[in-house]
Image (cartoon, rainbow, N blue to C red):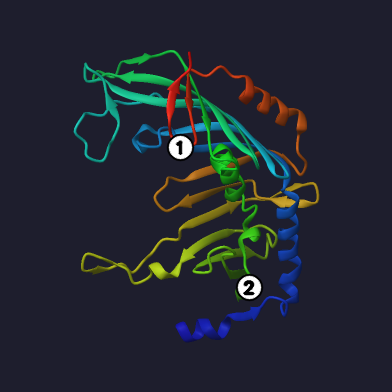
Amino acid sequence: MHTQHTLTALVLVLGSSAALAGPLEDMRARDAAAERMTLRATVSADSVRIDPTQGRATREVVYIRDGEREALSWIATHPDPTYRAPGDRHYSGDFGPSGELIVWQTVRFDGVRAPNSSVTVQVHQRIDVFPDGSLVRHPEHLTRTTFAPGALDSVWLGRECLLALGVGVTEHLAEPLTVEVQGQTTWIRAADATNPTLEWAIVVSEERPTISMCVFLNDHARRNQTTGTVLVCHIPPLIGVSTIGEVIVGEYSLPKSGWVDRVGMSRVMAELGDARFEADHEVFEAIAAHVAGAEAQEEVSADGERRLVE
């Protein structure tokens, strides 16, 4: 079986494969165009990061890239939280004096990133969940967080939306690339541009040659690991991306939806609402103005220091 697979697969160094050069260059052109982009998407992710049993929230996301500047804004709809009893060693949540479970949900997020700054303003709501299932909702609490200059934390979900749609992957590829044709799919492999011990694999199909059907980031050094005395045969990729469908945006193609899985994190799913390959400066400035002018109850600095705002 392995010999047959080897014989039927065609492996080439990029440059000698004229058939792939066009689609890959189209992907690279789209990724370059995405340096200035306005994206609206509906995103599904865990409602409470430390407790996946609380269900998934829906976030209506607006993400804008304008060269070295980025802005992100989203409003979330959460399911009602459910009670969890104290003592679960897998759960690190807080409990109140009457045994109520304390759940914090982020209902709005606004962030701006630039080379010399990275700031977010988040609106949280505390919900107390009692053993009988009753809920007590507290007034909303606004927190401003200042990260290290240029840190991606303020726009992380926007970047994750792009990745879930297969956008930006070619920026991480180092030369040389290899190409393997397997039936109606083609695998493009290359080392990571910043960490050569990691390998990217992009899978494209004949039907959507300029859209990544799947993307994987693998660490081959993790192969043949052992857990205790047991050999781990299957090592999941550090990042896994899958996409569905196709829509035309300007002169480029994007998938209708997709999702990204990261080791140790829950799945982020994105459904494309609207996109254009230009920055909406009016919306960008509105997000920036909100971040600058919001009156926070709490400030968090880049080193984690917290202080209440009088």
Pointer 1 residue: 303
The amino acid type found where label 1 is placed reads Asp
Crowding at label 1, few (<14), some or many (≥20) Cα neighbours within 10 Å?
few
Q: Quadrant of residue 176?
A: bottom right
The mark found on residue 177 in the picture is 2
Q: Nearer the viewer, residue 156 or 103?
A: 156
**Could you tell whether 90 is left or right of 273 in the image?**
left
Q: Nearer the viewer, residue 204 or 117?
A: 117
Residue 191 horizontal/vertical position (percent): 56, 69
* Residue farthest right in this picture: 251
1 vs 2, front mark: 1
Q: Residue at x 21, y 68 (%)?
A: 229
Whether 127 is drawn above or below 154: the answer is: above
Q: Nearer the viewer, residue 257 or 141?
A: 141
**Could you tell whether 237 is left or right of 160 in the image?**
left
| Residues tagged 1 and 2 counted as in contact (Cβ below 8 A) | no
Q: Quadrant of residue 188?
A: bottom right
Give the mark nearest the N terminus, 1 or 2.
Answer: 2
Residue 51 horizontal/vertical position (percent): 35, 36
Residue 227 horizontal/vertical position (percent): 26, 64
